[in-house]
Image (cartoon, rainbow, N blue to C red):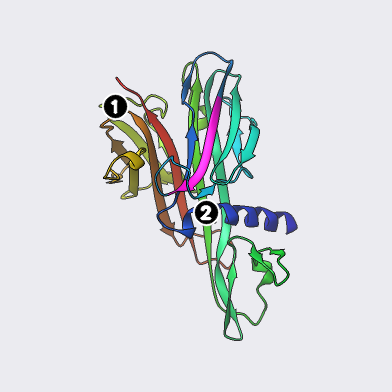
Amino acid sequence: MKTLTTRLLAAAALLSIPATVSAHRLWLLPSGTIFSGTDSWVTVDTAASNDLFYADHQPGRLEGMKVWQPDGTPGQIQNGATGRYRSVFDVQLNKPGTWKIGTETTALMGSFKVDGVEKRIGGRPGMGPNGQRVAPLTVADIPANATDVQLTEVSGRNEIFVTAGEPTRTVLTPTGKGLELDAVTHPDELVAGEPAKFRFLVDGKPAAGLKVTVVPGGKRYRNAEGARELTTGADGVLSVDWPTAGMYWLNATYQDAKSTTPRATGRRMSYTTTLEVMTP
């Protein structure tokens, strides 16, 4: 139970970054997505901010950051550092093919009451009376006399794809769990003026009618955000056209009552990626 509790607390802390202020989006920004040979490195920034890809609010956390090599085996991040507004790390692309980098998080969020006093489950650590950090409450902290127990299973994926040499698809294979992107068009083969197709899945099945937000970077240097809300078809497929080259942030959220966690009455899932669109 201790191991599970530690994992859930870490996940809850990460998930709470964009929820603190709804306008702040959590993002990963690679220095590039297409590299030649197997002697390249990619540097990745991660932060939560209002203007996409401009770090001005809070750094992303490196705990739980994972690397999948082109054959699907675990890789590693190197040279990680966290500053005031952003975190940064490197990945050595020493194998040919497409790599996946990002986080997969799961946590429980919610509340309960004891003698009419509401207490929260999950979230970030608080501060005790003596200035010490206090870990958030977990399911194990809910007493037998608790009332109004409301728990939600929260999960999210925030991932990017980078390719050394020719694109491959092993790391694009869906797991059949939660909200996922099944890339019909390879994410490292996007070109301005050419539509791309992505299939969204929930537990391996097409997510029909899913709302997906696509936002180009660079809002700091223009008046309009340029966000578009698109919807998947009955087959879960989303068609996206790219008016200009650049980095784009893509996000989808989904809710249902199919929680697999005891005492949770529902689940909320999110999927986020950053995509690079090249000039023709």
- The image shows residue 166 at horizontal and vertical percentages of 47, 16
Q: Which mark's residue is nearer the viewer, 1 or 2?
A: 2
Q: Which residue is mark 1?
A: 192
Q: Is residue 176 visible?
A: no
- Position of the N terminus, as image quadrant, is bottom right
Sequence-first tag of 1 and 2: 2
Mark on residue 256?
none
Toward the top, the furthest residue is 37
Viewer-proximal residue among 67 and 20: 20
Q: Residue at x 31, y 22 (%)?
A: 279
Q: Amino acid at mark 2?
A: Ile
Q: CA distance from mark 1 to mark 2?
A: 31 Å
Q: Which residue is mark 2?
A: 17
Whether 149 is among the magenta residues is no
Tell me the chief SS of the magenta region. strand
- The image shows residue 2 at horizontal and vertical percentages of 74, 58
Q: Residue at x 37, y 29 (%)?
A: 185
Numbered range of the magenta stretch: 42-49
Q: Give the vertical position of 39 relative to 272 (above or below).
A: above
